[in-house]
Image: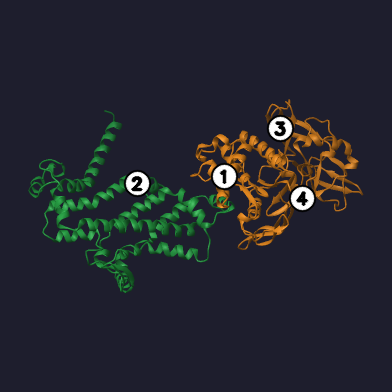
Amino acid sequence: MSVKHLKTLGWYLFLTGIGYVFLFPLLFMLVSSLKPEQAIFADLYSIRAILPVGELSLDNYRQVFEKSNVSLYFWNSLFITVGTVIMGLFVNSLLAFTLSRMSWRGQKLVLAVVIALMIIPLEAIVVPLLLLASKLPSIGWEGGMLVLKSSWLNTLHVQMLPFVANSFFIFLFYQFFRDIPKDFDEAAELDGATPFQIYRHIIVPMSGPVFATVAILHFLLMWNQYIWPIMAVQGEDARPLMPGIQIFFGRQSSWGEIMAYASLVTLPVLAVFLMFQKKFVTSLAGAGIKG
Amino acid sequence: MADLKLTQVIKRFGDLETIHGIDLDIKDGEFVVFVGPSGCGKSTLLRMIAGLEEITDGDIHIDNECVTRVPASKRGVAMVFQSYALYPHMTVRENMGFGLKMAKVSKHEITRRVDEAAQILQLGPLLDRKPKALSGGQRQRVAIGRTIVRNPKVFLFDEPLSNLDAELRVKMRVEIAKLHGELRNTMIYVTHDQTEAMTLADKIVVLRSGNVEQVGSPLELYLNPANDFVAGFIGSPQMNFINCEVLAVTADMLRLRFPCGLETDMPAMTANVKAGDNLKLGIRPEHVLEDASGELVICVDVDVVEHLGGSTFVYADYAGDISMTLQVGGLSDINGKDKREISFNRHYCHLFNEAGKSIGLRKDALELKAAEKMLPMAG
């Protein structure tokens, strides 16, 4: 075997090792979710811990659905996530469009503010945000009637609206749009298109990769929301999946059931990622934010 | 179809003035070429006419209507971009019909007009392709087609051929000339390639640093350049310039001394010339003779000879540091590194004063008829 082959083999071994480290928790979760409690502990110290062997069943999943209101949480999470992502794609890309392709007074200041906002974490603003949400009135259904509520707390929209606009996503769109030649806008302008028509008919169709990237990142961000729903939602009605797992964990549950719950939470994210993986990777390379 | 009139058009970017008060009249159906070196403001001027660049001062009239503050889409102009700017996600048909779609023209009418334009440009089989499946020349034709369907008053071309290879460029140049012949619309074409300017234009506008240097027909510019810049820019290879000193001035004659000591008389308009002035004598490469048969004979050191088959270019040094180019028809027997005599006749000479402005030669005294005979060759 030549040195070149040895090098390649070495690389493969190294990468397989790394892959194993990253895959281990995921495999362990999925496999354990199918095993009874004793089997999980019996297999814990052998390779069987990550192999789907022994007595396998969907009992744990059944238990999760029986013991917890997981389907309601799931629909809540899905509604919050998909709704926010759709609104976010529109709002963030539109602002990025005006920042990158139009000129208006105060443009540079707004761009600077957007960039500056990227460094402020949610934890820093979560308390004032909670105070604000508790004071904002809203209209909602209660007992089949339309009622005026005195606060936004315990609603679905309190989990969506504060997260629609996101400075990082605006910046991603901005970076991508900035690299599209201005000739397209000018050609469309001569063709009689308004700025919004240029956005709608020219820029959006040309920006598939960045829309895919932002959609995935925003999906993950929203799907994994934890601190904010715990603070802003107390009741069952508007609770999403993530705080649900904490409550489920707090009750008397077996590890198999917890793993089943965790698998239910993880699978949609994995599915979304695999679906958009190719576009996602191209776009990350294109956006110049490798790693 | 429309007249176009520019009145004292000025463009400033902040404090920097790039277009310095340009006046221009373009007649209906004329093919006008803006030509000049990079950064002379020709594209900016075109974009101001298109409405893509704001006009700092002055007015633009299209068809006697002031369009200075009219948005680009309402001016009745269509533009072919250097990059083509074809929308990559749309088919050729959608690209061509986009302007009409924006103008809410009926689908039936869009199809009819796109098909009509496609026929003129032989784009029929390509209508359902996306731009990336087209060659450079085809993309160029689609970009032109997109402007035709809108039936504009004025066509604007911003260096449309600069992305094509040499062979295709010549082909497209002919197609554009044919198109103008068919449509007879007013067309404005920007290029830095003087060959394109000479071959396409009814009227050439030579620009330098945001100023118009000269406006005229290609032959006017070739035969009577207003200054040394135009003389050097129009014509390929570039005109040769030889510095010479004025020894004596009479009513209609200048006595000149060349760097190598040769003295000669040149019949010229002598009003603003005085003895001791340094002038530039210009002679085009195609008017230099490879032997001593002309009226003025000078001795040069041949540097490089390029045999192109149909003609031969000879690059030589005169008086040590003056580069001379000769264009000789057919094959020449001149060899590299030769020392030899070359010559030229007075009636092909141009004289420029120290500021670069042309000093008219008295052609009457220079066998005018002989010069006129040479006109077809010059073009």
* Tag shown at residue B193: none
Report how far apart the C-alphas of labels 1 and 2 lie in the structure: 38 Å
Q: Secondary structure at mark 2?
A: helix
The crowd level at tag 1 (other Cα within 10 Å; few <14, some 14-19, many 20+) is few
The chain letter for the residue carrying disc 1 is B
The chain letter for the residue carrying disc 2 is A
- Please name the color used to draw chain B: orange
Task: Please determine if labels 2 and 3 lie on a single subunit.
Answer: no
If you read the primary sequence from the N terminus, does the residue marked by circle 1 or circle 3 appear first?
Answer: 1
**Residue A275, how many percent across, how many down?**
32, 45
Foreground: disc 1 or disc 4? 1
Q: Quadrant of the C terminus of chain B?
A: top right
The chain letter for the residue carrying disc 4 is B
Q: Residue at x 83, y 33 (%)?
A: B294
Going by the image, does B331 lie left or right of B108? right
Report how far apart the C-alphas of labels 2 and 3 lie in the structure: 63 Å
Does the rendering let one see residue B51? Answer: no
- Please name the color used to draw chain A: green
**In the rendered structure, which amino acid carries the disc numbered 3?**
Val
Residue linked to disc 3: B314
Task: Please determine if labels 3 and 4 lie on a single subunit.
Answer: yes
* Tag shown at residue B108: 1
* Tag shown at residue B356: 4
Name, please, the residue furthest toward the front. Answer: A144
The crowd level at tag 2 (other Cα within 10 Å; few <14, some 14-19, many 20+) is some
Going by the image, does A83 lie left or right of B77? left
Q: Secondary structure at mark 4?
A: loop
Foreground: disc 1 or disc 2? 1
Residue linked to disc 2: A276
Foreground: disc 2 or disc 3? 2
